[in-house]
Image: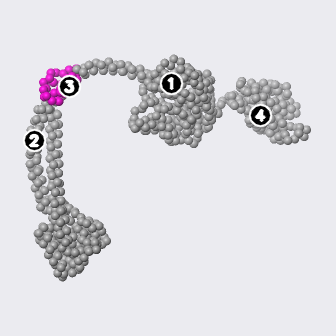
Amino acid sequence: MPKITKKINAAIITFTLILMFVNVALDYFQIRTILSETYDRFLIQNSYTAASYFKGDKLAQFAKEGTKSEEYKDCLIKLANLAENSDISFLYVIIPDMPDCKYKTYVFNIVNSKLRYKYNPYPAGYREDTKPSGSARYRKLMEQGGLVIDNDYFSHIGSRTRVSLALRDSTGKNVGIICVEKHLDSVAEILRSYMRIDLIYTPFFAMAFLLFFSLYIGKKFVKPIVSITKEADSFASHDAHFSDKLKEIHSNDEIETLARSIEKMGVDIQVYIKDLMRVTSEKERIGAELSVASGIQAGMLPKNFSPYDDYPSIQLYASMKPAKEVGGDFYDFFWTEKEKLWLVMGDVSGKGVPAAMFMAIAKVLIRNAATLDYSPAELCNRVNKQLCQENEEGLFVTCWIGCVNLSTGKMKFVNAGHNPPAFYDGSSYNFLTQKSGVMLAAFDNSEYIEHEIQIEKGSRLLLYTDGVTEAQNKDKELFGEALLLGALAKTAALSAKDTITLLNAEVERFANGAPQADDITALEFELDDFYSIPSEEKSITLPACDEKLTDVLDFIKSCLPDNVANEHLNKIELVAEEIFVNISHYAYDETGDAKIICKRFADEKIRITFIDSGKEFNPLEMAEPDFTLSAEERRLGGFGIYLTKQFMDKVSYERKDGKNVMTVEKRFS
């Protein structure tokens, strides 16, 4: 037997059996509901009839007097007749003890004669404990009035239904409850008989139906489908060819249409396979070339991140996730001098190979211009003109370029139509919103404005492309600048690498599986401390006499930068002359030597130390001249050291190892 026949037969049998049992169950509950509702209405009518036989005002008196009262006897007879004639199992009237109804006092208690062998009626005034379920029902009726119907098909005394009706006195107050109860043993027997009949005959007719229906399905549908399946399997296993068995199917329905369609499909597949082989070969070639291009592009981006032996106080980390095999985003960082760090972030318009090629050109031009000692603004002006030449594709690149002096923290930058970086000043991240210029390669006559800010120790700078802020989720919502700042707020204690990792994770979590529409690139720069400029030290020792002053000044001048301003040079020479002449005239009684040490810190500052073995003398202890006095009244001396303090940034003296050590410092910037 074919597998499909087995599955169809199993499905039919399972479905029929389920349908049969569901039908039996539904019929059972429907009949039970109908019978229950019928008896409920019957008992409601009887409860109202019984309540009409006496007044609620008499309940307390009846409970007390019982059969001593003729009126009570009359009511008792009427209630008993009602129970017998209506075949009511129990009819009783009670007065619950309020407010908790834990006890009840019987006024009337009628038991049907059919049940007298098993149950004895309680006399008037009989007091009994109430079960918790009964207490809740009685309290509800006494407080709210009305009636309550409850059915119990699994009671210890068998199936039953009961109606409880609140009784009122002439003032409208609920004073008691009448309960009418009927056993449903006959109903249960009816239901059991129905179930037996239903479960005997229904399977017989169901199996007969299954037999004929299965034969019909097998001949009409299964056999043609099996033929089609075998042909399809043969087609896949024997070089994509069909036999003539499909042509033998003539059922004049959808199965015949399927057979004809499969025949046509076979022809189409043969043509498709040939085309697919050609396209696959071409795609593999293009994929290999794109893989090489992707590797080349990745190789152009810096991968050697911090820590750096020469720059232990900075951190750098970046990442780029292209939307395609290759992308138009790029980042770069490099040094043009020991203390000058360039940071670059760019985004080329478009995607794919053209954008990647334009990115490579822009990156090379920017780095070449930076090595020629251009400022960021001059660099952008130059690169913009170069990119505009022969830009037939009309591509452009948004770019942010900054140059940080690591020794001072001053950063000069230009924004060419790019997203504003996020800057951390030690307390929070905020965007650098200085005026932006147009993107590079848009107009060859564009001029770019240079800005400058001071970066302090502990500052951070995040460069990124619009792939971050414009990342979308499945609802087309953008990640945006607010979520970017929110993500960065979590990174105060993180390294540059961990910051980029967290940011990428936040963007991915926001996208929630939505496809990446643009390249996502980010670079984090952190400055933990300023860069210490390597120093250059020279010294000279010569006799302390006025004739050697020229040699001293020439030596100091040789230690200064070539481009030192005349203003600084004049002040340094004047101070050097003042200190050396003082040593020459006052340090020694006869003759002695003076040693001059010059320590230059790149082009930032110079420290000059004068050492002699003469008499101990601290010129810094001299009183400064009083310029409020006239020249005749003013005491001589002190003016030279006063000028020294004014002209130098730092002046110090110490007596060390029996020598006078006088040190002055002067910054050039």
| Residue for badge 1 | 396
Q: Secondary structure at mark 2?
A: helix
| Badge nearest the viewer, 4 or 3 | 3
Q: Which mark is residue 261?
A: 3
| Residue for badge 4 | 647
Please tell me which of labels 2 and 4 falls first in the chain: 2
Quadrant assignment, res 449: top right
Residue at 58%, 32% (x, y): give it.
435
Which span is picked out in magenta?
Answer: 237-266
Residue 120 visible in the shown view: no
How far, Cα to Cα, is label 4 from label 1? Answer: 51 Å
Q: Secondary structure at mark 3?
A: helix
| Badge nearest the viewer, 2 or 1 | 1
**Looking at numbered disc 1 in the image, what kind of residue is underneath it?**
Phe
| Residue for badge 2 | 209
Please tell me which of labels 2 and 1 falls first in the chain: 2
Q: Which mark is residue 592?
A: none
